Image: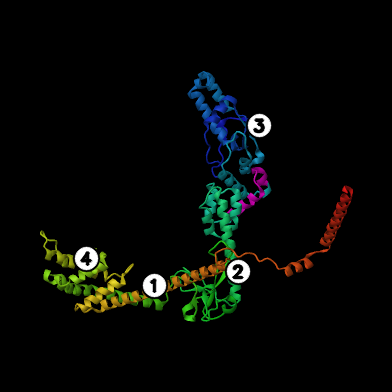
């Protein structure tokens, strides 16, 4: 060991210096003032009596700071100015150093191995040192021993040059440690996968690596399935977008032949229009899916509901939409024509007085329609304004107008519940009054008639079901009544149990006594005989 003046010490070439951050030096400077340099610096001798620091840059910087602190405020350390100056000169002029000529060219290994008062290298700094040691030509074992690395980590670092730029940047910034780098090496040929993995950080990196590994394994399995399907003679295609929802294609399991049999890979895989795709869109292993590209053209029936519509269905729907729009336009025009006709019915008190029978019918049969008159499309122009003074004629006109407009509005309803009898009655009434319906109105009335027929059919079915249920209930009740009657006599009392006849008793005795019962009967007979003998003896003694 040799004491060297601080001004004789040179920093290592910045390109070779692993430390990029000296950290906070004040704590170390105070320690040096109190204790001195406990761990010497490691230096390499150079020309002209100068030395290059291999390990100890931070301590050299802390020594300079200690000298400044001593001369700047001696009282902080309970020293006089002279004492502080002397202490500062001692610290800077007698810096203990290990002079290691044998370490020349081994600066990287020295920095990795040096410790003690030295601030630990950050992971990114250690990684940089590892890469420098590799570039200096040291073997894995030497680097592992000097820096305390695992041999596998050194091998992983050697592969860093082959990694994508994103991985090298992550190593330089410390986002990846050596263990993670070793796992990431398997994705060296997939820059996109590396970028996806590096979106995570810290402990989440290993989960991202595991996820990408599964993706790669599933992709390899999918490619194997495609190759096998091609060899087997199948046409392999991409999975259709929105399969089972809006796509034209459909899987075998949801298609049937005209005879009702479901399509299967065994019987239909190689027929026209049938292809396969590899499904990887779920957590299970990739699997081969058979489907038909144009089921409608091959006469297949779809077995599940989807939102797909064939071109013919789309065309039919578009035609129906156009026809519906045309009818709407015609219906709007028909309302105006009909409004003029309604004005002839309610436009004056005299005209309204002729149709009080309509008011009576509507009020009696469909009173709710009286409230709908104000919501009629032409109520503003057809409904008489409320007068300042009501007269019987004005009240009558107003009431008739409300009833007629309410009935007319209800007769146009097409959504929700419809009162078919009321609606059809009004259209028939208009005809009887001399109104000639337009084409759109005829179509509307035809819809109402079909609706009434369907309602009557449904009502008849419900009545038939109710009758059948009632008949079954009556039959069950009748059966129960008969059973109950058979169990009781005509007075309502339970039928008495029939006593067995003498012949039945004899048969029962003859057939029911076993050997033990016969023996018991014999014993009872002997007992009776003994009792008789005892009675005779007692009589003789009394005589």
What whole-number distance in Å separates the C-alpha atoms at marks 1 and 3?
A: 113 Å
| Residue at disc 4, secondary structure | helix
| Residue at disc 1, secondary structure | helix
The image quadrant of residue 318 is bottom left
Nearer the viewer's eye, disc 3 or disc 4?
Answer: 4
- Tell whether position 474 is magenta: no
Nearer the viewer's eye, disc 2 or disc 3?
Answer: 2
Q: Are marks 1 and 2 in contact (CB under 8 Å)?
A: no
- Location of mark 3 (residue): 1
- Location of mark 4 (residue): 373
Which of the pair 57/409 is nearer the observer?
Answer: 409
The image quadrant of residue 6 is top right
Which of the pair 42/73 is nearer the observer?
Answer: 73
Question: Would you say residue 130 is visible in this rendering?
Answer: yes
Which of the pair 528/88 is nearer the observer?
Answer: 528
Image color mode? rainbow
Which class describes the residues within 10 Å of circle 3: few (<14), some (14-19), or many (20+)? few
In the rendered view, does 148 fall on the left or right side of 175? right
Residue drawn at the location 65% of the way across and 41% of the way down: 103
| Span highlighted in magenta in the image | 142-161
- Location of mark 1 (residue): 459
* Residue 470 pos. (x, y %): 46, 70
* Residue 231 pos. (x, y %): 61, 75
Question: Would you say residue 322 is visible in this rendering?
Answer: no
What whole-number distance in Å separates the C-alpha atoms at marks 1 and 4?
A: 30 Å
Residue drawn at the location 67% of the way across and 40% of the way down: 102
Nearer the viewer's eye, disc 1 or disc 4?
Answer: 1
- Location of mark 2 (residue): 224
* Residue 81 pos. (x, y %): 50, 19
What whole-number distance in Å separates the C-alpha atoms at marks 1 and 2?
A: 61 Å
């Amino acid at each position: 060991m040799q004491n060297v003046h601080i001004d004789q010490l040179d920093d290592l070439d910045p390109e070779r210096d692993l430390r990029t951050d000296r950290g906070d030096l004040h704590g170390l400077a105070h320690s040096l003032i109190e204790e001195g340099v406990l761990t010497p610096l490691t230096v390499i001798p150079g020309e002209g009596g100068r030395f290059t620091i291999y390990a100890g840059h931070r301590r050299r910087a802390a020594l300079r700071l200690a000298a400044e602190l001593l001369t700047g405020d001696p009282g902080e350390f309970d020293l006089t100015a002279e004492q502080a100056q002397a202490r500062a000169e001692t610290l800077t002029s007698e810096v203990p150093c290990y002079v290691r000529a044998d370490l020349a060219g081994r600066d990287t290994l020295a920095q990795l191995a040096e410790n003690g008062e030295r601030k630990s290298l950050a992971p990114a700094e250690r990684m940089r040192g590892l890469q420098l040691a590799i570039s200096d030509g040291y073997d894995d074992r030497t680097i592992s021993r000097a820096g305390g690395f695992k041999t596998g980590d050194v091998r992983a670092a050697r592969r860093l040059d082959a990694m994508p730029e994103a991985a090298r940047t992550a190593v330089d910034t410390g986002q990846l440690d050596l263990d993670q780098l070793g796992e990431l090496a398997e994705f060296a040929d997939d820059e996109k996968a590396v970028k996806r993995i590096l979106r995570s950080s810290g402990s989440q990196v290993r989960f991202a690596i595991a996820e990408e590994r599964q993706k790669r394994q599933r992709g390899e399995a999918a490619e194997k399935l495609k190759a096998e399907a091609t060899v087997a003679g199948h046409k392999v295609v991409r999975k259709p977008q929105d399969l089972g929802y809006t796509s034209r294609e459909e899987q075998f399991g949801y298609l049937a032949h005209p005879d009702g049999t479901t399509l299967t890979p065994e019987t239909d895989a190689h027929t026209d229009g049938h292809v396969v795709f590899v499904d990887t869109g779920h957590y299970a292993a990739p699997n081969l899916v058979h489907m038909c590209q144009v089921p409608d053209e091959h006469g297949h029936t779809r077995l599940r509901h989807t939102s797909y519509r064939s071109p013919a269905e789309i065309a039919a729907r578009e035609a129906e939409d156009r026809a519906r729009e045309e009818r709407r336009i015609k219906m709007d025009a028909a309302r105006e024509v009909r409004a003029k006709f309604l004005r002839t019915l309610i436009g004056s008190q005299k005209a309204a007085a002729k149709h009080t029978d309509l008011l009576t019918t509507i009020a009696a049969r469909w009173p709710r329609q009286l409230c709908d008159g104000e919501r009629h499309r032409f109520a503003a122009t057809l409904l008489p304004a409320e007068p300042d003074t009501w007269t019987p004629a004005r009240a009558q006109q107003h009431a008739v107008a409300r009833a007629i407009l309410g009935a007319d509005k209800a007769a146009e309803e097409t959504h929700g519940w419809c009162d078919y009898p009321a609606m059809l009655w009004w259209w028939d009434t208009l005809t009887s009054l001399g109104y000639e319906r337009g084409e759109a109105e005829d179509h509307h009335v035809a819809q109402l008639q079909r609706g009434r027929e369907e309602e009557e059919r449904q009502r008849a079915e419900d009545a038939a079901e109710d009758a059948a249920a009632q008949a079954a209930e009556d039959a069950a009740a009748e059966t129960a009544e008969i059973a109950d009657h058979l169990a009781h006599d005509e007075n309502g009392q339970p039928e008495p149990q029939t006593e067995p006849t003498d012949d039945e008793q004899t048969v029962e005795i003859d057939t029911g006594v076993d050997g033990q019962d016969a023996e018991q009967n014999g014993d009872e007979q002997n007992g009776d005989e003994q009792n008789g003998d005892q009675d005779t003896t007692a009589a003789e003694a009394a005589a």
